[in-house]
Image: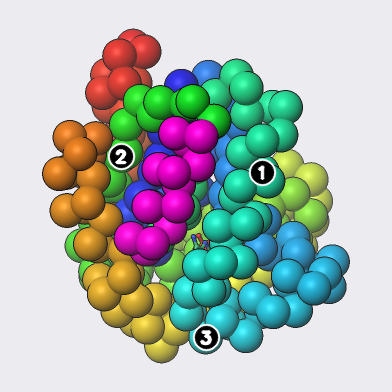
Amino acid sequence: MRIILIGPPGAGKGTQAEKIVERHGVAHISTGDILRANVKAGTELGVKAKGYMDSGKLVPDDLIIEMVESRLQEKDCEKGFLLDGFPRTVPQAEALDQLLTRLNIALDGVILLDVDDETVVNRLSGRRMCRGCGKIFNVSYKPSSKGDICDSCDGQLYQRDDDHESVIRNRLEVYHEQTAPLVTYYLAREQLFKVDAVKGDDVPDKIDAIVGRS
Ligand code: AMP
């Protein structure tokens, strides 16, 4: 399985990606997770990316494209992959097309997780992440049974800097301006499949049906 998940921030890309990856054993490539790991480790990439991320802006395309190029060539991607949060701009999509052609890899599809802006704001302002294992919770819909401690690894839960309401509104604006044009891009290539992601429960089944793996 080789798929791309796109959608606004808070569409549930991370949560759905975890389920799909567990079900199909493919590599999960989340550009947001890779960037956060770089910020945490204080790498050169992390230092360059942090300011953009904290204010909800996109990290420049050249940094992201280079990062994904090397990640896609790692061994675990041979059995398939799920791209989560990439591409986010038309130039990123074009760079990805060129890379996949060069690597002789075909995509099964691009899945758009469709949710409205108000659902996004409600979801993201309640989102908490584990500092230890990165597991995602929500104070309203999916709380940890241990309060602000992760029920998987006992790590501390925290609210991402970019999950505060003013930053969320900014990220939505960035999405509508820079990422939504990908819908037209992939529709024109007959690669786009839209999934209603307001109720998240059956999204992995819908995706399996789309890519013919059910
Ligand atoms: P995410 O976890 O996917 O919501 O990403 C968090 C932040 O990382 C975004 O708001 C951007 O600042 C940055 N980021 C992640 N993926 C990309 C990408 N493909 N292009 C540019 N910036 C990205």
Can residue 156 be seen?
yes
Residue at image position (31%, 21%) is 211
What secondary structure is found at the residue carrying circle 1? helix
Residue annotated with mark 2 = 111
Region of the chain picked out in magenta, as a range: 89-102
Q: Which residue is mark 1?
A: 71
Going from the N terminus, do you reach mark 3 or mark 2 first?
A: 3
The three-letter code of the residue at mark 3 reads: Ser
Q: Which residue is mark 3?
A: 55
Relative placement, left or right, of 35 versus 178 is right
Q: Residues within 10 Å of mark 2 (few under 14, many from 20)?
A: many
Which secondary structure type mostly characterizes the magenta part of the structure? Answer: helix
Gap between marks 3 and 2, in whole Å? 27 Å
The image's mark for residue 81 is none
Describe residue 159's horizontal placement relative to residue 123 as left or right. Answer: right
Residue 192, image x, y percentages: 22, 39
Q: Amino acid at mark 2?
A: Ile
Whether disc 1's CB lies below 8 Å from ligand 1 is answered no
Q: Is residue 96 magenta?
A: yes
| Most foreground residue, 49 or 25 | 49
Name the quadrant of the C terminus.
Answer: top left
Is the residue marked by circle 3 packed among few (<14), some (14-19), or many (20+) residues within 10 Å? some
Q: Earlier in the sequence, mark 3 or mark 1?
A: 3
Identified by mark 1, the residue type is Arg
As helix, strand or loop, the secondary structure at mark 3 comes to loop
Instruction: Report, in whole angstroms, how far the alpha carbon at label 1 lies from the one at label 2.
Output: 21 Å
Give how far across and how far down residue 110 sits, in percent. Answer: 32, 38
